[in-house]
């Protein structure tokens, strides 16, 4: 977690300076993105909420996204990460939304993605999505790498 604190502090400072807010819907990072952003003193000025959307049940209960997913979409894809980001942003009334979905390991997921696969998306003034493949089956290292890449994407978008 320590390596996530410096980018989170920079992001928090930018969000506070701009008067902007954020909401997070993450899966395979297990809450690390939210935890890093909340570790910044004064996070209540910008952090509106977050959820670990690890199961279909959580997706339905917290975000009211139907099952099956719309338009034949599947989890662990950029369109699904974008749906998470868009939905959590709208539900929380935030300026920015972050969505993350993937397979941390040590095995892949039921969709055929290998361990070390994640898709991350932003929704807000800038909308972006990306896929990261670490090539590793180390669950904890992947969680950290996924969260670090999500924070880097957000920091890039904030300028």
Image: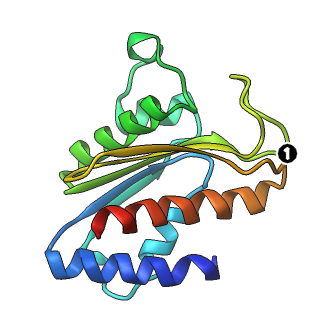
What secondary structure is marked by label 1? loop
Q: Nearer the viewer, residue 72 or 125?
A: 125
Seen at 19% across and 57% down, the residue is 95
Query: Can residue 22 be seen?
Result: yes
Dot 1: within a 10 Å radius of its alpha carbon, few (fewer than 14), some, or many (20 or more) residues?
some
Residue at screen point 61% across, 44% down:
118
- What x and y, as percent, mark residue 101? 55, 41
Tally of marks: 1
Q: Which residue is mark 1?
A: 106
Q: For residue 140, what is the image quadrant?
A: bottom right
Locate residue 46 relative to residue 33 in the image: left or right. left
Q: Is residue 71 positioned above or below 35 on the image?
A: above
Quarter of the figure with the C terminus: bottom left
In the depicted structure, whether residue 43 falls above or below residue 143 = below
Q: Position of residue 103 (x, y in %)?
A: 69, 41
140 relative to 155 in the view: left or right: right
Position of the N terminus by quadrant: bottom right
> Quick one: which residue is furthest to the bottom in this view?
41
At which x and y percent is residue 12? 33, 78
Q: Quadrant of residue 17?
A: bottom left
Residue farthest along the left direction in this orientation:
19
From the top left corner, tell me how far across and down residue 139 is, in percent: 79, 54
Which residue is nearer to you in this view: 55 or 37? 37
Residue found 49% across the figure and 44% down from its top: 130
């Amino acid at each position: 977690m320590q390596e996530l604190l410096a980018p989170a502090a920079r992001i928090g400072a930018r969000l506070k300076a701009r008067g902007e807010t954020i909401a997070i819907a993450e899966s395979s990072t297990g809450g690390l993105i939210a935890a890093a952003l909340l570790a910044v003193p004064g996070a209540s000025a910008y952090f509106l909420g977050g959820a670990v959307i690890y199961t279909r049940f959580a997706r339905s209960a917290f975000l009211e996204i139907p099952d099956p997913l719309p338009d034949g979409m599947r989890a662990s894809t950029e369109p699904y990460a974008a749906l998470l980001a868009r939905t959590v942003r709208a539900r929380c009334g935030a300026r920015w939304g972050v969505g993350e979905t993937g397979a941390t390991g040590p095995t892949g997921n039921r969709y055929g993605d290998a361990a070390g696969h994640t898709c991350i998306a932003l929704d807000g003034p800038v909308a972006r999505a990306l896929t990261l493949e670490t090539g590793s089956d180390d669950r904890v290292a992947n969680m950290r790498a996924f969260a670090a890449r999500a924070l880097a994407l957000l920091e890039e978008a904030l300028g």
